[in-house]
Image (cartoon, rainbow, N blue to C red):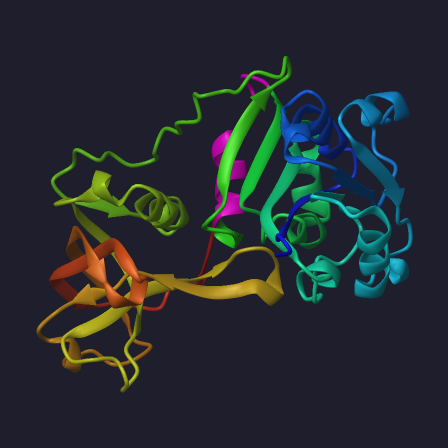
C-alpha cells in the first residue's frame, strides 16, 4: 500500500527567515527520522544549505526558480525521480499563493502544515507600503512565526493585522537570540472590570479579535458599542448580527465582522440600520460558529446616527 507523502509549506516575504526555519526544523531537528526528504527551494534564501549537511539528514535539494515552472507536472516529475517520504517547500515570497494552494498536488502528496515567517524589523514598513503583497503570504498559514523580536516590537499590532486576515493562525514570537517570547499579552485599551465596557470605533477591532481568541474572558461581561445591523430575512427569528465593516488588508478586502446576538425584538430592527447596543456576552455553542463562541444577549438597543467613517480598522 502506498503511503501518503506529507508536504510542509514554508512561506513568507523576502528575507523573513524561511531558510533558517527549515534549517532548524530539518537539519537541527529530528525530521530525518521520517525518511527521505525532498527540499524544493523556489528562491535563494539568506541561509545556504550545505550539501554535506543535507546528505547527513537524507535530503535531496532541488531548485524551481520560475513561477511558470512550478506546476503539478514538474512536481510530479520530481516526486517520481526522488521518491521522497516527505516534502519541504520554501515558497517564493513574490509568487502568488494561489499558484500552490489551487494546484492539484502530485499523487500521494498531502499538505499537512503551512508555516509562514515574518521579520519583525521590516514587517511594519511592509504593512505600510506593500500590505496586500506581504499578507498574501500569511493568509493560509497554520502557524505564523514573527522572528527577531525585541522589547519594542509592536506585537499587538502585528497580531491584529494577521488575525484580521487569518483567524485560525497560531502566532509565535521569536526573540533575536532564537528563544520563544512567551510574553505576547497586550494591554487592552478598555477596562474589563467596568460594569459596562464601552467599545469605541477605534477599539472595535481589538475587542472583536480578542473576544474571538479568548471568549471565556468575556463570559458575563456587558459591552456597549455602535453597530450596523445585519438581519436578512433568512436569519431566524429573535436573532440579528450587530457589527461593522472592517478593512482587513486593503480596499478590496472589506468584510463585515460581528457576533451573533439574541434579542426578542430583533424583528423590529431594520436590516442595515445603525444602533447603539448594550449586550451581555456568553460563551456558548452556535451553529454559525460551528462550535462555541461569543454570543451576545441584547439588554438595550437604541437607534443611532451613521458615523462619519463607517469602516473600522485592525491596526
Q: Is residue 126 visible?
A: yes
Seen at 79% across and 64% down, the residue is 72
Position in image of residue 19 (x %, y %): 76, 31
- Is residue 315 in view from this perspective? no
- Start-end of magenta stretch: 150-163
Q: Is residue 156 left or right of residue 63?
A: left
Query: From this viewpoint, which residue is outermost toward the bottom?
Result: 233
- At which x and y percent is residue 96? 75, 58
Residue 185, image x and y in percent?
A: 39, 27
The answer to whether 2 appears left or right of 168 in the picture is right
Determine the residue positioned at 35% across, 68% down. Answer: 306
Among the 4 quarters of the image, the one containing residue 90: top right
- Left or right placement of residue 241 versus residue 266 in this view: right
Task: Depth check: give the residue in front, 182 or 108.
Answer: 108
Q: Position of residue 133 (x, y in %)?
A: 72, 52
**Residue placed most toward the observer, 197 or 282:** 282
Amino acid at each position: 500500500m502506498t503511503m501518503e507523502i506529507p508536504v510542509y509549506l514554508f512561506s513568507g516575504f523576502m528575507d523573513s527567515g524561511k531558510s533558517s526555519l527549515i534549517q532548524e526544523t530539518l537539519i537541527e531537528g529530528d525530521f530525518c527520522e521520517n525518511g527521505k526528504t525532498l527540499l524544493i527551494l523556489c528562491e535563494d534564501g539568506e541561509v545556504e544549505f550545505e550539501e554535506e549537511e543535507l546528505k547527513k539528514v537524507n535530503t535531496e535539494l532541488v531548485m524551481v526558480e520560475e513561477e511558470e515552472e512550478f506546476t503539478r507536472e514538474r512536481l510530479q516529475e520530481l516526486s517520481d525521480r526522488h521518491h521522497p517520504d516527505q516534502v519541504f517547500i520554501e515558497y517564493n515570497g513574490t509568487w502568488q499563493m494561489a499558484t500552490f494552494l489551487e494546484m492539484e498536488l502530485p499523487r500521494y502528496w498531502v499538505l499537512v502544515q503551512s508555516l509562514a515567517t515574518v521579520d519583525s524589523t521590516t514587517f511594519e514598513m511592509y504593512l505600510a507600503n506593500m500590505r496586500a503583497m506581504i499578507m498574501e503570504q500569511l493568509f493560509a498559514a497554520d502557524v505564523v512565526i514573527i522572528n527577531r523580536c525585541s522589547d519594542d516590537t509592536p506585537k499587538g499590532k502585528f497580531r491584529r493585522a494577521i488575525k484580521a486576515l487569518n483567524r485560525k493562525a497560531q502566532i509565535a514570537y521569536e526573540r533575536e537570540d532564537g528563544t520563544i517570547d512567551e510574553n505576547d499579552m497586550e494591554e487592552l485599551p478598555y477596562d474589563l472590570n467596568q460594569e459596562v465596557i464601552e467599545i469605541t470605533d477605534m477599539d472595535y477591532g481589538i475587542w472583536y479579535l480578542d473576544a474571538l481568541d479568548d471568549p471565556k474572558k468575556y463570559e458575563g461581561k456587558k459591552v456597549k458599542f455602535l453597530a450596523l445591523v445585519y438581519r436578512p430575512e433568512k436569519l431566524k427569528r429573535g436573532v440579528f448580527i450587530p457589527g461593522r465593516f472592517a478593512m482587513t488588508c486593503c480596499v478590496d478586502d472589506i468584510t463585515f465582522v460581528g457576533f451573533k446576538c439574541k434579542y426578542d425584538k430583533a424583528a423590529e430592527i431594520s436590516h442595515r440600520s445603525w444602533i447603539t447596543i448594550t449586550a451581555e456576552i456568553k460563551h456558548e455553542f452556535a451553529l454559525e460558529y460551528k462550535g462555541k463562541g461569543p454570543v451576545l444577549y441584547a439588554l438595550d438597543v437604541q437607534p443611532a446616527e451613521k458615523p462619519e467613517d463607517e469602516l473600522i480598522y485592525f491596526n
